[in-house]
Image (cartoon, helix red, strand yellow):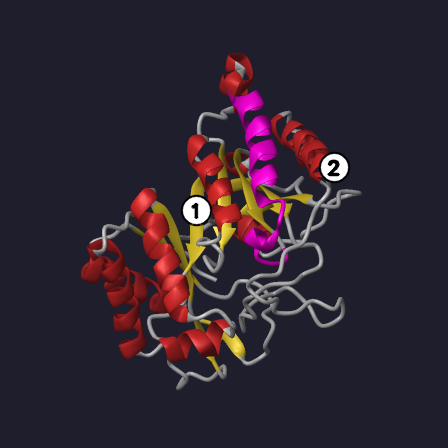
Amino acid sequence: MSFDPAAQSLFQSHPRSFEENQYVYPVLSRRAGGISIGVNLNIAKNCNFDCIYCQVERSNVGGSRTAPTARHRVDVSRLADELWKMVEETVTGRLFIHPRFCDTPPNLRRLNDIALSGDGEPTLCGDFGKVVERCAVVQRAFRSHDLVRRTFGLHDFKLVLITTATMLHRKYVQRGLELLDAHHGEIWAKLDAGTEAYYRQVNRSGVSFDQVLTNLREAARIRPIVIQSLFMRIDGTPRAASPTIDEQEAFCCRLSDLIAAGGQIKLVQVHTVARAPAERWVTPLTNAEIDSLADLIRCRTSLDVAAYHA
């Protein structure tokens, strides 16, 4: 998927801070095709993935790969207040007066979603269910007002959980997912590998690959999910064909396994490194390589695939 140069430069900037906000930040998202309002549920930058391509700098703030059982809390009231104001700023157009967003092309000046994401795995937050509930209140308030919905094009305004899928089996997370489902939300779940070895190399997590696959399968049996996959060249040389053909085929097999088990996959997003990664020896795949991989996934699985170039 290609965008004009002006938009492309804006897509490369995803700071998770805005003005005086602690939790809520707007980004121009190429995957959303418009403004996505991020909700950072892990401002301490802890995560149970340590992906080699992640752009979050953890070493200077004490962030780390957190044990799967670790939880933390957020100020839910402040978060909700920040979210309400940010949605209002976006739908009224005041956001596009801000220097960071004033060059946003007219066709991308639309509010697509509220995304539970941030600087770490959002489902590590012990207040996950409460946050989903408050986000749903804000979403419903703006969508339920007919004039506001029609004037600002909020027909598709939705809630999205962007997750590693490592915690989806936890009871407190599942309660939050039920609320997400009740408000027509979506799960955008990460799957970057087809084999255990490549998963260990890329995602560097203490959570087993089998647990991730099990969580994806169970989540997809209940509702359609979006699979987010990032592929890259490791070592940064033309000969470092990463992922290998065997790994690409294995990835397709994992998707087919999910479908065969009754899982519903709405879309597979295939993208590559777009911002400075954690490791300097990680570099983007070419447009042709991304397109080729997307074609392979379509051929092997018959799923809808969106390819995003660097």
Tell me whether the residue at label 2 lies in contact with that at label 1, contact meaning CB atoms closer than 8 angstroms. no
Q: Residue at x 49, y 56 (%)?
A: 167
Question: In this orientation, does residue 287 appear?
Answer: no
Kindly tell me whether residue 7 is visible in this rendering: yes
Residue 283 spot, x, y in % from top left: 51, 74
The image position of residue 306, as x and y in percent, is 35, 52
Q: Which residue is mark 1?
A: 187
Q: Amino acid at mark 2?
A: Arg
For residue 154, the mark is none
Q: How many numbered tags mark residues here?
A: 2
Secondary structure predominantly adopted by residues drawn in magenta: helix
Look at the numbered disc 1 and give the secondary structure of its residue: strand
Instruction: Tell me, yes or no, whether the highlighted magenta stretch contains residue 265.
Output: no
Give above or below for 141 relative to 251: above
Q: Is residue 265 above or below residue 112?
A: below
| Within-10-Å neighbours for mark 1: few <14, some 14–19, many 20+ | many
In primary-sequence order, the first of circles 2 and 1 is 2
Residue 78 numbered mark, or none? 2
Amino acid carrying mark 1 in the image: Ile
Q: Specify start and end residues of the magenta stretch as a single range.
A: 119-143
Residue 210, image x and y in percent? 37, 68
- Measuring from the top left, give residue 251's x and y in whole percent: 30, 68
Q: Is residue 128 magenta?
A: yes
Is residue 245 shown left or right of residue 7? left
| On screen, residue 59 above or below 268 | below
Q: Residues within 10 Å of mark 2 (few under 14, many from 20)?
A: few
Left or right relative to 49: residue 196: left
Along the viewing direction, whichever of 4 and 227 lies nearer the viewer? 227
Residue at 33% x, 71% y: name it. Answer: 194
Q: Residue furthest right?
A: 20
